Amino acid sequence: MTILYGTPTDPEAFREYYIDKHVPLARKMKGLTGWNLQWTDGNPDWILVAELYAEDKAAMDAVLASPEGVAAREDLENFVTGGVVFLSGEVEQVALS
């Protein structure tokens, strides 16, 4: 799952809340196999791209439906002021050569 966080009204407050409050909530979600955070550099539309990984769609659905997943989703209203977009799908590895 990829989560796009729109540029907030206060980027500094967003980043502080995300790191100090939201990440600890998200760390409680069982079943994730990994995640990446990419803080954008000067993009006017997005401040953060978060990528969450699970074994498969069923596993990701279970993570998101868990009490910890629901708590993380409900926490968004506490700090997201620039909108948020959720994209889901399967990751395809492409060889460079």
Image (cartoon, helix red, strand yellow):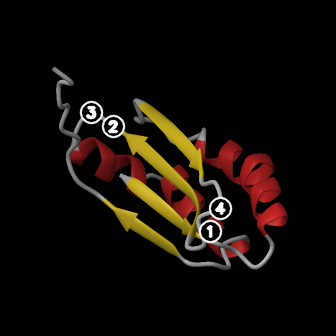
Please tell me the numbered disc located at residue 76: 1
If the image is split into quadrants, where does the C terminus sit?
Answer: top left
Numbered mark located on residue 42 in the image: 4
Describe the element under mark 3 as helix, strand or loop: loop
Task: Measure the alpha-carbon separation of dots 3 and 1.
Answer: 24 Å
Give neighbour class at mark 3: few <14, some 14-19, many 20+ (Cα, 10 Å).
few
Q: Nearer the viewer, mark 3 or mark 4?
A: 4
Observer-side mark, 2 or 4, equals 4
Helix, strand or loop for disc 2:
loop
Amino acid, disc 2: Ala
- What amino acid is found at the position of numbered circle 1 in the picture? Leu
Residue 36: % across, % down = 51, 38
In the rendered image, the vertical position of residue 74 relative to residue 61, given as above or below: below
Closer to viewer: mark 4 or mark 1: 4
Residue 1 point in image, percent of width and height: 35, 52
Q: Which residue is mark 3?
A: 55
> Label 3 near label 2: C-beta < 8 Å?
yes
Q: Give the residue type at disc 4.
A: Gly
Query: Which comes sooner in the sequence, label 3 or label 1?
Result: 3
Q: Which numbered disc flags the more N-terminal residue, 3 or 4?
A: 4
Whole-number angstrom distance, CA of label 2 to CA of label 1: 21 Å
Picture disc at residue 38 = none
